[in-house]
Image (tube, rainbow, N blue to C red):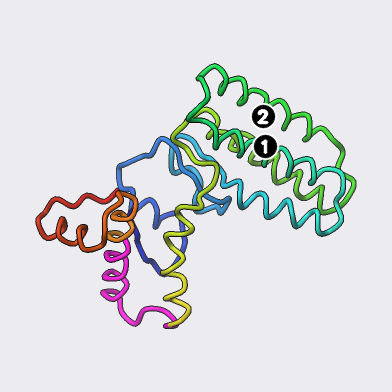
Amino acid sequence: MLHDIAPRRAKSVAETVLGDYRPGVWVSDRYAGQQDLALAHQVCLAHVLRDVQYAIDCGDTVFAPKIRDHLRWAIRVGKRRTELKDSTLVAYAAKAERRLDTLLAIPAAHPAGKILQRQIKAWRTKFFVFLTDREVPPTNNVSEREIRPSVVFRKVTNGFRSDWGAQVHAGYRSVTGTARLKGQTALQAVRDLVNGTFVVA
């Protein structure tokens, strides 16, 4: 789990961190700076569902509720991937795509529904990558949880006073975050770091 702290969220920040490495799949929200960084892109369905709920709260009773139910169904299928055969998962992925096409053909009457429909059409090919690749999560919740302590730290302290302070914090979060993913304690991770055997996950 690699952390990097920069003064802005530009795409160049992620590109600098990645260097020549190009991931197979990138999971993120729909922020422009997170696009085209990998061979494939899975949009975070948790973020999409928030937009869907907003459209529902605004009064859309036709399009948004159906999208909500469909995305929730797809996420439930994703949680069962370990017990599904490859052929079954392929069938579910095809069903998810067909159903989304059907829903996008529904005329959205409410203004909020129209906006949501345009957004989904713009990201049409990036909703169900997780149904074709068992290693891909449907949301970026893991990353969101990992950066939350840093976000809270920034708000409490009003930001870092120096570049080296930010780098130290990012290094600390990288070590402890990786340790957590590996089921290690922070102390074990620090020992591995000192011994030269620590590898960022």
Q: Position of residue 201 (x, y in %)?
A: 30, 48
Q: Amino acid at mark 1?
A: Trp
Residue annotated with mark 1: 73
Q: Is residue 53 magenta?
A: no
Q: Is residue 68 above or below residue 173?
A: above
Between residues 147 and 5, which one lies in front from this camera angle?
Answer: 147
Name the kind of residue labelled 2 in the image: Ala
* Residues under numbered marks 1 and 2 in contact, where contact means CB atoms less than 8 Å apart: yes
Vertical relation: 160 (above or below) 116: below
**10 Å neighbourhood of mark 2: few (<14), some, or many (≥20)?**
many
x, y percentage for residue 70? 71, 37
Q: Which span is picked out in magenta?
A: 157-173
Residue 170 magenta-highlighted = yes
Return the residue nearer the eye: 102 or 33. 102
Where is residue 96? Give x, y as percent.
67, 29
Q: Tell me the SS state at disc 2.
A: helix
| Main SS category, magenta section | helix
CA–CA distance in space, label 1 to label 2: 9 Å
Residue at position x 37%, y 66% in the image: 5
Using the image, tell me which numbered label, if any, was put on residue 96.
2
